[in-house]
Protein backbone atom coordinates (compact mmCIF):
# COMPACT_ATOMS: atom_id res chain seq x y z
CA UNK A 1 0.00 0.00 0.00
CA UNK A 2 1.25 3.49 -0.85
CA UNK A 3 1.11 6.07 1.91
CA UNK A 4 1.16 9.85 1.53
CA UNK A 5 4.48 11.68 1.62
CA UNK A 6 3.73 13.12 5.07
CA UNK A 7 2.15 9.98 6.47
CA UNK A 8 3.54 8.53 9.68
CA UNK A 9 3.19 5.15 8.00
CA UNK A 10 5.58 6.18 5.23
CA UNK A 11 9.12 5.09 6.19
CA UNK A 12 10.46 7.84 3.92
CA UNK A 13 8.65 10.58 5.82
CA UNK A 14 10.91 13.59 6.49
CA UNK A 15 9.96 13.77 10.18
CA UNK A 16 12.99 11.82 11.39
CA UNK A 17 15.45 13.77 9.25
CA UNK A 18 14.08 17.13 10.36
CA UNK A 19 14.16 16.18 14.03
CA UNK A 20 17.67 14.76 13.64
CA UNK A 21 18.87 18.03 12.09
CA UNK A 22 17.73 19.87 15.23
CA UNK A 23 19.46 17.32 17.43
CA UNK A 24 22.66 17.69 15.43
CA UNK A 25 22.80 21.43 16.17
CA UNK A 26 23.43 20.48 19.80
CA UNK A 27 26.17 17.89 19.21
CA UNK A 28 29.73 19.05 19.81
CA UNK A 29 32.90 17.66 18.26
CA UNK A 30 33.87 15.93 21.52
CA UNK A 31 30.72 13.76 21.33
CA UNK A 32 28.69 15.65 23.89
CA UNK A 33 25.28 17.22 23.48
CA UNK A 34 24.25 20.55 24.92
CA UNK A 35 21.00 20.14 26.78
CA UNK A 36 19.65 23.18 24.93
CA UNK A 37 21.22 26.29 23.29
CA UNK A 38 19.73 28.58 25.96
CA UNK A 39 22.66 30.54 27.55
CA UNK A 40 20.58 31.62 30.55
CA UNK A 41 20.80 34.94 32.32
CA UNK A 42 23.85 37.12 32.84
CA UNK A 43 24.34 35.71 36.34
CA UNK A 44 24.43 32.17 34.94
CA UNK A 45 21.02 31.08 36.21
CA UNK A 46 18.84 29.16 33.80
CA UNK A 47 21.82 28.14 31.69
CA UNK A 48 21.15 25.05 29.58
CA UNK A 49 24.00 25.16 27.04
CA UNK A 50 26.05 22.77 29.17
CA UNK A 51 26.49 19.03 29.56
CA UNK A 52 24.25 16.87 31.72
CA UNK A 53 25.50 13.29 31.88
CA UNK A 54 21.97 11.93 31.62
CA UNK A 55 21.04 14.22 28.74
CA UNK A 56 24.10 13.19 26.71
CA UNK A 57 23.39 9.48 27.08
CA UNK A 58 19.72 9.86 26.18
CA UNK A 59 20.42 12.39 23.42
CA UNK A 60 22.88 10.13 21.64
CA UNK A 61 20.54 7.13 21.95
CA UNK A 62 18.80 8.17 18.73
CA UNK A 63 22.03 7.50 16.84
CA UNK A 64 21.73 3.78 17.54
CA UNK A 65 18.24 3.69 16.04
CA UNK A 66 19.56 5.47 12.94
CA UNK A 67 22.71 3.35 12.62
CA UNK A 68 25.08 6.20 13.53
CA UNK A 69 27.08 4.05 15.94
CA UNK A 70 30.25 6.14 15.60
CA UNK A 71 28.41 9.14 17.08
CA UNK A 72 26.93 7.07 19.89
CA UNK A 73 30.20 5.39 20.85
CA UNK A 74 31.97 8.75 20.88
CA UNK A 75 29.33 10.10 23.28
CA UNK A 76 29.86 7.20 25.68
CA UNK A 77 33.62 7.64 25.39
CA UNK A 78 33.09 11.25 26.49
CA UNK A 79 30.98 10.13 29.45
CA UNK A 80 33.85 7.86 30.52
CA UNK A 81 36.33 10.70 30.02
CA UNK A 82 34.27 12.93 32.34
CA UNK A 83 33.92 10.21 34.94
CA UNK A 84 37.63 9.38 34.81
CA UNK A 85 38.52 13.04 35.09
CA UNK A 86 36.64 13.09 38.41
CA UNK A 87 37.40 9.51 39.41
CA UNK A 88 38.94 10.57 42.71
CA UNK A 89 35.46 11.57 43.90
CA UNK A 90 34.12 8.11 43.11
CA UNK A 91 37.07 6.40 44.77
CA UNK A 92 36.76 8.63 47.84
CA UNK A 93 33.09 7.66 48.12
CA UNK A 94 34.04 3.98 47.93
CA UNK A 95 36.33 4.45 50.92
CA UNK A 96 33.90 6.58 52.90
CA UNK A 97 30.45 7.90 52.14
CA UNK A 98 30.61 11.65 51.44
CA UNK A 99 28.37 14.03 53.32
CA UNK A 100 26.61 15.11 50.12
CA UNK A 101 27.51 13.31 46.88
CA UNK A 102 30.37 12.18 44.71
CA UNK A 103 29.53 12.31 41.01
CA UNK A 104 28.13 15.60 39.72
CA UNK A 105 25.29 15.87 37.23
CA UNK A 106 26.46 18.62 34.86
CA UNK A 107 29.72 19.85 33.38
CA UNK A 108 31.26 22.60 31.28
CA UNK A 109 31.12 21.54 27.61
CA UNK A 110 34.79 22.27 26.87
CA UNK A 111 36.70 22.07 30.17
CA UNK A 112 34.55 19.21 31.51
CA UNK A 113 34.73 20.79 34.95
CA UNK A 114 31.83 20.52 37.37
CA UNK A 115 29.17 23.23 37.31
CA UNK A 116 27.19 24.31 40.36
CA UNK A 117 28.12 22.43 43.52
CA UNK A 118 24.75 23.33 45.06
CA UNK A 119 22.69 20.79 43.21
CA UNK A 120 20.95 17.45 43.67
CA UNK A 121 23.91 15.61 42.24
CA UNK A 122 23.52 12.13 43.72
CA UNK A 123 21.46 10.60 40.91
CA UNK A 124 21.52 6.82 40.86
CA UNK A 125 19.68 6.61 37.55
CA UNK A 126 22.66 8.20 35.76
CA UNK A 127 25.01 5.46 36.97
CA UNK A 128 22.42 2.75 36.36
CA UNK A 129 21.80 3.92 32.80
CA UNK A 130 25.54 4.15 32.08
CA UNK A 131 26.11 0.58 33.30
CA UNK A 132 23.07 -0.71 31.45
CA UNK A 133 23.95 0.88 28.13
CA UNK A 134 27.68 0.13 28.16
CA UNK A 135 26.86 -3.52 28.81
CA UNK A 136 24.23 -3.45 26.07
CA UNK A 137 26.70 -2.03 23.55
CA UNK A 138 29.31 -4.64 24.43
CA UNK A 139 26.70 -7.39 23.98
CA UNK A 140 25.98 -5.96 20.54
CA UNK A 141 29.65 -6.31 19.59
CA UNK A 142 30.94 -2.77 20.11
CA UNK A 143 34.34 -2.16 21.66
CA UNK A 144 33.21 0.27 24.34
CA UNK A 145 35.88 -0.48 26.94
CA UNK A 146 39.22 -0.06 25.21
CA UNK A 147 41.54 0.55 28.16
CA UNK A 148 42.21 -1.00 31.55
CA UNK A 149 41.30 2.34 33.11
CA UNK A 150 37.87 2.23 31.52
CA UNK A 151 37.31 -1.33 32.75
CA UNK A 152 38.37 -0.28 36.23
CA UNK A 153 35.82 2.54 36.05
CA UNK A 154 33.02 -0.01 35.67
CA UNK A 155 34.30 -1.82 38.77
CA UNK A 156 34.50 1.46 40.67
CA UNK A 157 30.93 2.42 39.81
CA UNK A 158 29.58 -0.97 40.88
CA UNK A 159 31.47 -0.76 44.16
CA UNK A 160 30.27 2.82 44.58
CA UNK A 161 26.66 1.66 44.29
CA UNK A 162 27.22 -1.13 46.78
CA UNK A 163 28.85 1.18 49.34
CA UNK A 164 26.04 3.70 48.88
CA UNK A 165 23.51 0.97 49.71
CA UNK A 166 21.72 1.88 46.51
CA UNK A 167 18.53 0.02 47.41
CA UNK A 168 17.89 2.03 50.59
CA UNK A 169 19.91 5.25 50.33
CA UNK A 170 17.87 8.20 48.99
CA UNK A 171 18.92 9.99 45.82
CA UNK A 172 17.76 13.02 43.83
CA UNK A 173 16.31 11.05 40.94
CA UNK A 174 15.86 11.91 37.30
CA UNK A 175 14.51 15.37 38.06
CA UNK A 176 17.29 16.24 40.52
CA UNK A 177 14.90 16.70 43.42
CA UNK A 178 14.72 15.07 46.83
CA UNK A 179 16.41 13.25 48.36
CA UNK A 180 14.07 10.27 48.42
CA UNK A 181 14.18 6.63 47.43
CA UNK A 182 12.85 6.58 43.84
CA UNK A 183 11.58 3.46 42.11
CA UNK A 184 12.86 4.83 38.78
CA UNK A 185 16.36 5.12 40.26
CA UNK A 186 16.20 1.65 41.81
CA UNK A 187 15.06 0.24 38.47
CA UNK A 188 17.91 1.93 36.60
CA UNK A 189 20.51 0.51 38.98
CA UNK A 190 18.87 -2.92 38.96
CA UNK A 191 18.92 -2.89 35.15
CA UNK A 192 22.57 -1.85 35.09
CA UNK A 193 23.67 -4.50 37.56
CA UNK A 194 21.48 -7.14 35.89
CA UNK A 195 23.09 -6.38 32.54
CA UNK A 196 26.55 -6.98 33.97
CA UNK A 197 25.59 -9.88 36.23
CA UNK A 198 24.33 -11.63 33.10
CA UNK A 199 21.68 -13.78 34.79
CA UNK A 200 19.80 -14.25 31.50
CA UNK A 201 17.22 -11.47 31.93
CA UNK A 202 18.37 -9.60 28.82
CA UNK A 203 19.45 -12.53 26.64
CA UNK A 204 16.38 -12.13 24.41
CA UNK A 205 17.95 -8.95 23.02
CA UNK A 206 21.09 -10.46 21.55
CA UNK A 207 21.81 -12.83 18.71
CA UNK A 208 25.11 -13.84 20.34
CA UNK A 209 25.20 -13.61 24.11
CA UNK A 210 28.47 -12.68 25.75
CA UNK A 211 29.15 -13.25 29.42
CA UNK A 212 30.01 -9.78 30.69
CA UNK A 213 31.37 -11.36 33.85
CA UNK A 214 34.45 -12.09 31.73
CA UNK A 215 34.94 -8.33 31.43
CA UNK A 216 33.87 -7.16 34.88
CA UNK A 217 32.54 -9.71 37.39
CA UNK A 218 29.49 -8.72 39.45
CA UNK A 219 28.75 -10.50 42.69
CA UNK A 220 25.29 -11.90 43.40
CA UNK A 221 25.42 -10.11 46.76
CA UNK A 222 24.55 -6.87 44.95
CA UNK A 223 21.05 -8.31 44.48
CA UNK A 224 20.43 -9.24 48.10
CA UNK A 225 17.70 -6.69 48.80
CA UNK A 226 17.37 -4.45 45.72
CA UNK A 227 14.71 -6.42 43.80
CA UNK A 228 12.57 -6.72 46.91
CA UNK A 229 12.88 -3.01 47.72
CA UNK A 230 11.64 -1.91 44.31
CA UNK A 231 8.72 -4.36 44.51
CA UNK A 232 7.76 -2.90 47.88
CA UNK A 233 7.85 0.66 46.51
CA UNK A 234 6.09 0.07 43.19
CA UNK A 235 3.79 1.20 41.74
CA UNK A 236 4.71 4.43 43.59
CA UNK A 237 7.70 6.46 42.48
CA UNK A 238 8.54 7.47 46.04
CA UNK A 239 6.97 8.05 49.41
CA UNK A 240 5.81 11.51 48.30
CA UNK A 241 4.86 10.69 44.67
CA UNK A 242 2.18 8.28 43.59
CA UNK A 243 3.48 8.21 40.04
CA UNK A 244 6.11 9.95 37.94
CA UNK A 245 7.00 10.33 34.26
CA UNK A 246 10.46 8.91 35.08
CA UNK A 247 8.86 5.54 35.80
CA UNK A 248 8.39 4.99 32.06
CA UNK A 249 12.12 4.17 32.07
CA UNK A 250 11.25 0.93 33.88
CA UNK A 251 9.49 -0.12 30.66
CA UNK A 252 11.85 1.52 28.19
CA UNK A 253 14.78 1.38 28.02
CA UNK A 254 15.14 -1.03 30.94
CA UNK A 255 12.27 -3.54 30.61
CA UNK A 256 12.96 -4.40 34.25
CA UNK A 257 9.38 -4.86 35.57
CA UNK A 258 6.85 -7.59 34.79
CA UNK A 259 4.03 -7.20 32.27
CA UNK A 260 1.40 -6.38 34.86
CA UNK A 261 3.51 -3.60 36.36
CA UNK A 262 4.28 -2.22 32.90
CA UNK A 263 0.57 -1.73 32.27
CA UNK A 264 0.03 -0.26 35.74
CA UNK A 265 2.80 2.31 35.25
CA UNK A 266 1.57 3.17 31.76
CA UNK A 267 -2.01 3.58 32.97
CA UNK A 268 -0.91 5.80 35.88
CA UNK A 269 1.04 8.12 33.58
CA UNK A 270 -1.73 8.31 30.97
CA UNK A 271 -4.58 8.84 33.43
CA UNK A 272 -2.88 11.04 36.02
CA UNK A 273 -0.07 12.92 34.27
CA UNK A 274 -1.08 13.32 30.61
CA UNK A 275 -2.13 16.88 29.67
CA UNK A 276 -2.94 18.95 26.57
CA UNK A 277 0.65 20.01 25.82
CA UNK A 278 2.52 16.97 27.07
CA UNK A 279 3.04 15.03 30.27
CA UNK A 280 3.65 16.59 33.67
CA UNK A 281 6.57 15.05 35.55
CA UNK A 282 4.48 14.47 38.69
CA UNK A 283 1.54 16.07 40.44
CA UNK A 284 2.46 19.31 42.21
CA UNK A 285 5.71 19.79 40.25
CA UNK A 286 7.01 23.31 40.98
CA UNK A 287 9.46 23.57 38.08
CA UNK A 288 8.04 26.25 35.73
CA UNK A 289 4.73 25.90 37.57
CA UNK A 290 2.32 28.65 36.49
CA UNK A 291 0.93 29.12 40.02
CA UNK A 292 3.32 27.99 42.74
CA UNK A 293 0.82 28.90 45.44
CA UNK A 294 -1.53 26.33 43.90
CA UNK A 295 0.89 23.91 42.24
CA UNK A 296 -1.51 21.04 41.58
CA UNK A 297 -3.20 21.58 38.25
CA UNK A 298 -0.67 24.19 37.12
CA UNK A 299 2.35 21.96 36.44
CA UNK A 300 4.57 22.37 33.38
CA UNK A 301 3.74 19.97 30.55
CA UNK A 302 6.58 18.16 28.74
CA UNK A 303 6.25 17.16 25.04
CA UNK A 304 9.12 14.75 25.72
CA UNK A 305 6.62 12.71 27.71
CA UNK A 306 4.50 12.18 24.59
CA UNK A 307 7.50 10.78 22.72
CA UNK A 308 8.30 8.53 25.68
CA UNK A 309 4.71 7.25 25.76
CA UNK A 310 4.92 6.59 22.02
CA UNK A 311 8.11 4.55 22.49
CA UNK A 312 6.51 2.54 25.29
CA UNK A 313 3.47 1.75 23.15
CA UNK A 314 5.76 0.77 20.26
CA UNK A 315 7.66 -1.59 22.55
CA UNK A 316 4.47 -3.14 23.94
CA UNK A 317 3.26 -3.66 20.37
CA UNK A 318 6.59 -5.26 19.48
CA UNK A 319 6.76 -7.55 22.52
CA UNK A 320 3.17 -8.66 21.97
CA UNK A 321 3.17 -8.79 18.19
CA UNK A 322 1.71 -12.30 18.20
CA UNK A 323 -1.54 -10.64 19.28
CA UNK A 324 -2.53 -8.51 16.29
CA UNK A 325 -5.40 -6.75 18.01
CA UNK A 326 -3.33 -5.63 20.99
CA UNK A 327 -0.38 -4.63 18.81
CA UNK A 328 -2.61 -2.37 16.73
CA UNK A 329 -4.11 -0.79 19.87
CA UNK A 330 -0.63 0.19 21.00
CA UNK A 331 0.45 1.40 17.57
CA UNK A 332 -2.65 3.58 17.28
CA UNK A 333 -1.82 5.23 20.62
CA UNK A 334 1.74 5.78 19.49
CA UNK A 335 0.53 7.40 16.28
CA UNK A 336 -1.78 9.67 18.29
CA UNK A 337 1.10 10.90 20.45
CA UNK A 338 3.43 11.39 17.50
CA UNK A 339 0.88 13.51 15.65
CA UNK A 340 0.36 15.56 18.80
CA UNK A 341 4.09 16.31 18.96
CA UNK A 342 3.87 17.74 15.45
CA UNK A 343 1.46 20.38 16.74
CA UNK A 344 3.70 21.31 19.68
CA UNK A 345 6.89 22.04 17.75
CA UNK A 346 8.08 25.63 17.41
CA UNK A 347 9.92 26.15 14.12
CA UNK A 348 10.70 22.46 14.07
CA UNK A 349 12.02 22.51 17.64
CA UNK A 350 10.61 20.53 20.55
CA UNK A 351 10.59 22.77 23.62
CA UNK A 352 11.43 21.46 27.06
CA UNK A 353 7.96 22.26 28.34
CA UNK A 354 4.79 24.31 28.12
CA UNK A 355 3.67 26.45 31.02
CA UNK A 356 0.29 28.19 30.93
CA UNK A 357 -0.01 27.03 27.34
CA UNK A 358 3.26 28.65 26.21
CA UNK A 359 6.63 27.01 25.46
CA UNK A 360 9.66 27.95 27.52
CA UNK A 361 12.98 29.10 26.09
CA UNK A 362 14.76 25.74 26.38
CA UNK A 363 14.40 24.66 22.77
CA UNK A 364 15.33 22.56 21.02
CA UNK A 365 15.75 20.16 23.95
CA UNK A 366 18.31 17.50 23.02
CA UNK A 367 16.88 14.42 24.65
CA UNK A 368 13.34 15.35 23.58
CA UNK A 369 14.46 15.25 19.94
CA UNK A 370 16.28 11.98 20.54
CA UNK A 371 13.14 10.44 22.04
CA UNK A 372 11.13 11.82 19.13
CA UNK A 373 13.46 10.15 16.62
CA UNK A 374 13.40 6.87 18.54
CA UNK A 375 9.60 7.01 18.75
CA UNK A 376 9.28 7.60 15.01
CA UNK A 377 11.80 4.95 14.00
CA UNK A 378 10.53 2.32 16.43
CA UNK A 379 6.97 3.01 15.23
CA UNK A 380 8.05 2.32 11.64
CA UNK A 381 10.03 -0.78 12.68
CA UNK A 382 7.25 -2.26 14.79
CA UNK A 383 4.64 -1.51 12.16
CA UNK A 384 6.69 -3.43 9.61
CA UNK A 385 7.21 -6.39 11.98
CA UNK A 386 3.50 -6.60 12.74
CA UNK A 387 2.57 -6.30 9.08
CA UNK A 388 4.92 -9.13 8.10
CA UNK A 389 4.07 -11.28 11.09
CA UNK A 390 0.36 -11.24 10.25
CA UNK A 391 0.73 -10.91 6.47
CA UNK A 392 -1.53 -7.88 6.24
CA UNK A 393 -1.71 -4.37 4.85
CA UNK A 394 -2.89 -1.47 6.98
CA UNK A 395 -4.64 1.74 6.02
CA UNK A 396 -3.88 5.18 7.45
CA UNK A 397 -6.05 4.42 10.48
CA UNK A 398 -4.02 1.24 11.12
CA UNK A 399 -6.99 -0.93 10.25
CA UNK A 400 -6.29 -4.18 8.35
CA UNK A 401 -7.19 -3.88 4.68
CA UNK A 402 -6.41 -7.35 3.40
CA UNK A 403 -3.69 -9.95 3.42
CA UNK A 404 -0.55 -9.27 1.41
CA UNK A 405 -1.27 -12.20 -0.89
CA UNK A 406 -4.94 -11.48 -1.48
Image: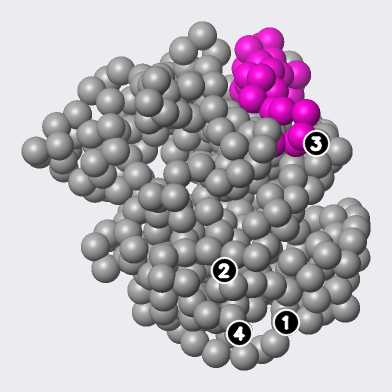
- Residue drawn at (72%, 82%) of the image: 218
Residue 45 in the image: x percent, y percent?
Answer: 37, 30
378 above or below 146?
Answer: above
Which label is found at residue 218?
1
Query: Residues under labels 4 and 2: Cα distance?
Result: 10 Å
Query: Residues under labels 4 and 3: Cα distance?
Result: 32 Å
Q: Secondary structure at mark 1?
A: loop
Which numbered disc flags the more N-terminal residue, 4 or 3? 3
Question: Magenta stretch: residue 6 in it?
Answer: yes
Which numbered disc flags the more N-terminal residue, 4 or 2? 2
Query: Residues under labels 1 and 4: Cα distance?
Result: 8 Å
Query: Which residue in the structure is indicated by mark 3?
Result: 71
- Contact (Cβ within 8 Å) of mark 3 with mark 1: no
Q: Secondary structure at mark 4?
A: helix
Q: Pick the quarter of the image with the N terminus.
A: top right
- Residue drawn at (60%, 84%) of the image: 222
Q: Secondary structure at mark 2?
A: helix
Query: Residues under labels 3 and 1: Cα distance?
Result: 29 Å
For residue 298, side relative to residue 329 (left or right) = left
Q: Pick the quarter of the image with the C terminus.
A: top right
Query: How packed is label 2: few (under 14 Cα within 10 Å), some, or many (20 or more)?
Result: many
Residues 118 and 46: in front is 118
Query: Which residue in the structure is indicated by mark 4?
Result: 222
Residues 116 and 20: in front is 116
Which numbered disc flags the more N-terminal residue, 3 or 2? 3
- Contact (Cβ within 8 Å) of mark 1 with mark 4: yes
Magenta stretch, residue numbers: 4-32
Asked whether the viewer can see residue 74, the reply is: yes
Query: Which residue in the structure is indicated by mark 2?
Result: 189
| Prevailing secondary structure of the magenta residues | loop
Amino acid sequence: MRYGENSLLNPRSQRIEKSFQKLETLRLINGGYLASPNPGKADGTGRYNVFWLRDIMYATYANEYLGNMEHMLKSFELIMTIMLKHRELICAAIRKLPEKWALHARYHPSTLEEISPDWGHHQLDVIGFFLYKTGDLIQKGHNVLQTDEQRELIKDLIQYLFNYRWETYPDFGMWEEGPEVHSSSLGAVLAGLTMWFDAGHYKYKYAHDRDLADVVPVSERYFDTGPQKIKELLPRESQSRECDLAQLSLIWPYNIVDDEMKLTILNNVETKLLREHGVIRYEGDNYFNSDKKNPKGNEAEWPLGLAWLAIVHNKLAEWGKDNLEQSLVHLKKSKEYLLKIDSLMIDGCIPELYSRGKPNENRPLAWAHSFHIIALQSFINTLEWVRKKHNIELNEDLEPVNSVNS
